[in-house]
Image: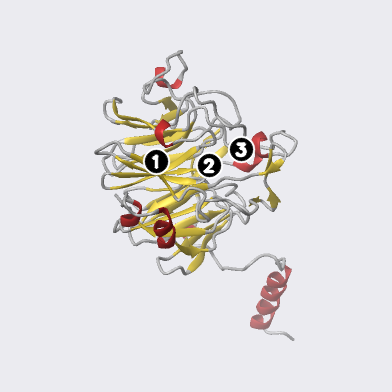
Amino acid sequence: MPTTRQRLRRVFLSFFLAIPAAVTWHGPARAHERLHVQWTSDRVLNAVAVADNGRTFISFPYWGGGGSGPTVAEIDAGGQPHAFPDARWNHPDGTRDDLQPFVRVNALRIGPDGLLWVVDSGNANVGGPPSPHNGAPARLLAFDITTGRVAHAISLRAASTPHSYMDDIRFHGDTIFVTDAGDPALVVVNLSTGAQRRVLAHDRSTTDDRPMYAEGRMLIAHGRQVRIHADQLEVSPDGQKLYFQPSSGPMWVVPTAALENPTLSAADLSHAVTLFHDTPTTGGTAIDGDGNLYVSDVNRLSILRITPQGKTTTLIHDRRLVWADAMWIDSHGMLWIPAVQLDRTATFQPDGVSRLHLPVAIYTMDLHLKPVR
């Protein structure tokens, strides 16, 4: 007659063998590795930034779905979004200057200066026809989050082409780095002098030359494969390196000193760029104070952690992480992950029909990371 231990062993084996082969058994999840639902929205968002005092800001892309509302919003203590800095900035009023209301906000970040920086792509249309020369140019806008006043309004017209789509932003001292996802390049802006330079234009490192995949499907828009050129970027904690990539990957790295040297030839700058990691199709990234990169794999619904030495592990795999976009590490070491279903919007469907499953969500993981400021 089987002993109690033998009976328990048979029960365990029958349960274990019943797990589908495609599932990896990791044992009980530790509490700090679980996703926490921080906020949900019936509109598609694409970025989150949390100030050190806890104020939370989000932006909504123009190609999203789920109704109308502000382009940039602050989430109050009760979880309600309010137009930031005010209603006027979030509603077209017919003006046509550097201080006109938001046109098409693609990214927002709280910079090392504590300002909320917004990338307004203007009339650009990612994946669509080129923008008109006389349309609203791309801008960088920086707001004092205490007063709501504009601290900087920088037109990127001088660094743009008719095919440009200014995408995302990072900082190094007085230098601002911007990715051009429409006409492959990086844009280097000197905040002190106002000088703007397009660098690595149509370089292999800025050009998306391979298919993008999300949830097992190749992305198609306007009847063609989606091409999102220079997109994600992160500056190393010591400020010496810029990591960047097209949305399809791979990820490259270049010394910031090379990017900031206006006398360096295009060929020499290109030679200074090296391949860092063969990343998958990516929605968003983050970097912690130890130099570890967090990269979303939108095809496998995962977040990868890549060390400065290039060693990769899967931080989390979860079917809820549908197109994890621009992530954020707050002052408490929490990783914020917007899972925004961008690939399900009408823009990225071959038949132009939205397949969103609202609401979308922002998740957090309490990882006790070291933030970069």
In the image, 54 versus 276, the foreground residue is: 276
| Residue at image mark 3 | 127
Kindly identify the amino acid type of the residue bearing the numbered disc 1.
Answer: Ala
- Residue 295 left/right relative to 242: right
Instruction: Pinpoint residue 14: horizontal percent, then vertical percent.
Output: 72, 73
| Tag nearer the camera, 3 or 1 | 3
In the image, 193 versus 357, the foreground residue is: 193
| Residue pictured at 50% horizontal, 53% vertical | 203
Q: Is residue 111 visible?
A: yes
| Residue pictured at 40% horizontal, 59% vertical | 268
Alpha carbon distance from label 3 to label 1: 26 Å
| Residue at image mark 2 | 183
| Residue pictured at 31% horizontal, 38% vertical | 195
Instruction: Pinpoint residue 266: horizontal percent, then vertical percent.
Output: 42, 53
Which residue occupies the extreme top position in the image?
94
Alpha carbon distance from label 1 to label 2: 26 Å
| Residue at image mark 1 | 49
| Residue pictured at 57% horizontal, 45% vertical | 228
Alpha carbon distance from label 2 to label 3: 10 Å
Contact flag, marks 1 and 2 (Cβ < 8 Å): no
Q: Is residue 370 visible?
A: no
> Badge 3 local density, few (<14 within 10 Å), some, or many (20+)?
many
- Residue 137 left/right relative to 66: left
- Residue 1 left/right relative to 136: right
